[in-house]
Amino acid sequence: MNSFVNEPTGVFPSVCSLDCPDQCGLLVHKQDGKIIKMQGDPNHPVTKGNICNKVRNMTERIYDPNRLKHPLKRTGVKGEGVFEEISWEEAIETITYQWKKLIKDYGPESILPYSFYGNMGNLSAEGMDRRFFNRLGASQLDRSICSAAGAQGYKYTMGGSFGIDPEETVESKLIIFWGINAVSTNMHQIALAQKARKNGAKIVVIDVHKNQTGQFADWFIPIQPGTDAALALGMMHILFAEEMADVDFLQNYTVGYKELREHVVQYDPVTVSNITGVPVEDIYKLARMYGNTSPSFIRIGNGPQHHDNGGMCIRTIACLPALTGQWLVKGGGAIKSNKGYLAHNAEILQRPDLLKNKDTRVINMNLLGQALLELDPPVKSMYVYGTNPAVVTPEVNKVKKGLEREDLFIVVHDLFLTETAKYADIILPATSAFENTDFYTSYWHHYIQIQEPAIEKYGESKSNVEVFQLLAEAMGYVDSSLFDSEVEMITQALDYKRNPHFEGITFERLSEEKYVKANVTQIVVGKLLTPSGKIELYSEQMEKDGYPPLPTYIPLVEDDGDYPLLFVPGPNHNYLNSTFSNNKKHITLEKEPRVFISKKDALVRGITDGDQVRVWNNRGECILKASVGESVLPGVAVTQGLWADLPGTKQLVNTLTPDRVADMGNGATFFSGRVDVEKVV
Ligand SMILES: Nc1nc2c(c(=O)[nH]1)N[C@H]1C(S)=C(S)[C@@H](COP(=O)(O)OP(=O)(O)OC[C@H]3O[C@@H](n4cnc5c(=O)[nH]c(N)nc54)[C@H](O)[C@@H]3O)O[C@H]1N2
Ligand SMILES: Nc1nc2c(c(=O)[nH]1)N[C@H]1C(S)=C(S)[C@@H](COP(=O)(O)OP(=O)(O)OC[C@H]3O[C@@H](n4cnc5c(=O)[nH]c(N)nc54)[C@H](O)[C@@H]3O)O[C@H]1N2
Ligand code: SF4
Ligand SMILES: [Mo]
């Protein structure tokens, strides 16, 4: 194993740890022991030396004077942010004293781990933490805030998170970005699309907001939020009616195409246009373009699945490539997520067997407010790492009320004093990914990568793995797996006979070669992990699970209160969820939080471009700047970015979002809330 910590000057390999599909190869430039520059590694086969603005500015984040250096304990009231320094010994002693007491008085399920993928490293995000909390017997967390609904929907159709190799998409002749703001969130797919475009490909974007990605398109199709399944069904209607469907493919590789053909008769272009807001002639044009162009590729984003009907919506879009037999064409097909190919040995990495009580309760992370305020028996302690729930969870006012509970013992492990950390009783300083050993598996390209420590640990900070080992020791646990080294854990996770894509991939190889491509050839459409092994246009499994077996348009749930605008608060270009929202340079680049509304909606409310407006519903309110124009349809309000509330501001959009659960996967419904907007006078 390499460690570059003791080499004060030079250029060292690294990988981006952020929750982004691209998982770029990086080169870290060091001088006098410090990183002075972050560069994309030109040798990375997919990301090829290009990185985003966010990570080009990463050194500022790593050496930010506000970064946490020492453990802290709270001396002020919850949420106020007043703390004093303590030693690691005192911090670990305080935490384990409280936990031992809680376990005795209330049982281990009174403790709730709360985490997400602030660091995508498999050891950091789902390694030693899982072993530790399984051994402790803590409540389990259903980590369904991101892509759970869509993943389940896609799985019903395709058997799991398997799409095509993005490197092939340079050969596509039609690329549809469907509900993905790829210019901001998957920039290397844009680079590949640009190459394809030079070879004659057309780029179509289907979105509720004409953002950077819509502007990049050859053809932008605006759509009403939550109605994409209807558009996909309308396309199927035309593909069958005009005999553009590939009947050979459908017969050989799918289940239920005849039922589907009957079923889509009802989704005629006029009906679909009334639902989606897409003009009838555009539905014809899109279907014919899709039916007559090969290879055609659909990049399915996260937007359409952050809705009440998100699972069914993605299940429906995922049926499209089968209709034209695109899965057999190089550069044809779709990608929602490619996570399935790089699945490591989670059983050995996470050790679910250490959890003795198999009936341990499971808490949906999207319902955190409810969990903290209403659960019986109550959550008495929460340990937060790799996420910032006081900003990123839906119905965040409810969450904050829960975090304010005096009888809730909160520990936060982070690099910064985040909005969540302000509620903590104990704060622990975290290393940045550049200070750790970990391995990374992209959910878009097919490369596995490794991080070996590039710089020494900042202040007294510790990695997730280290902290859980300290906690395990102080709890008196003796299971040897709780004290495995990082290299041992990586070796165990890669040794996974059940995943043929990992054959021959070892820690040593990763350490030497940096980027190792999994042994993925092409998606094998006859041997999928669906019950039939085929693409399931008709799914018996869905029927058993209580869903319509055929792809179906299901309208959004009626939101509480009668507010006129559908509210779509997505991420922005220069932050990564709430990460970087505390950095001056990134804030300056984003200027200020805005709400995009149509001219029509602005006019009836007497709002002009640039006005301060109040956006509200019965869950909360925000004060934002209005951006009036043609970028959204009437009836829609869009914001970008998870801005934290600074003193005197009201810009935390999750005060407005619903904590309803989506149709599948216990997913989030961030984009299915309703609001109204008025001018602030
Ligand atoms: N710069 C940057 N990159 C990121 C992130 C970030 O915060 N900033 N976050 C990372 C994470 S965790 C994730 S999950 C991904 C998310 O990245 P994406 O997959 O791009 O998902 P979103 O940005 O949530 O939404 C994508 C698009 O869907 C649109 N949309 C919303 N509702 C609908 C709908 O009903 N129909 C259609 N057709 N479109 C709709 C939105 O306007 C938006 O343009 O990005 C990752 N990358
Ligand atoms: N309104 C609205 N809300 C959303 C979304 C949306 O589109 N709209 N998107 C949702 C989605 S898709 C997602 S994925 C979630 C993401 O939400 P989060 O997972 O909360 O993502 P971040 O806000 O980036 O917070 C990550 C935190 O982890 C910390 N961190 C980084 N590395 C480490 C480490 O190694 N150890 C520890 N202990 N901490 C570390 C960072 O400093 C940061 O504070 O937000 C969701 N919330
Ligand atoms: S955030 Fe995404 S695009 Fe930016 S460096 Fe990381 S992996 Fe690459
Ligand atoms: Mo996400």
Image: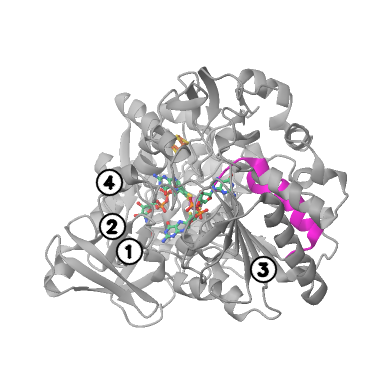
Q: Residues within 10 Å of mark 1 (few under 14, many from 20)?
A: many
Q: Residue at x 81, y 42 (%)?
A: 483
Q: Nearer the viewer, residue 539 or 122?
A: 122
Give amino acid for label 3.
Ser
Instruction: Check disc 3 and report its element: helix, strand or loop.
Output: strand
Q: Residues within 10 Å of mark 4 (few under 14, many from 20)?
A: few
Q: Is 417 on the left-hand or right-hand side of 213?
A: right
Res 534 seen here: yes
Residue 15: percent from left, percent from top: 54, 31
Disc 1 target residue: 651
As for residue 298 lying within the magenta part, the answer is no
Disc 4 target residue: 588
Disc 2 target residue: 593
Give amino acid for label 4.
Thr
Circles 2 and 3 in contact, beta carbons < 8 Å: no
Magenta region = 118-138
Q: Is residue 547 above or below residue 8?
A: below
Q: Spatial distance from mark 2 to mark 3, Cα to Cα?
A: 34 Å
Disc 3 target residue: 381
Q: Spatial distance from mark 3 to mark 4, Cα to Cα?
A: 37 Å
Q: Residues within 10 Å of mark 3 (few under 14, many from 20)?
A: many
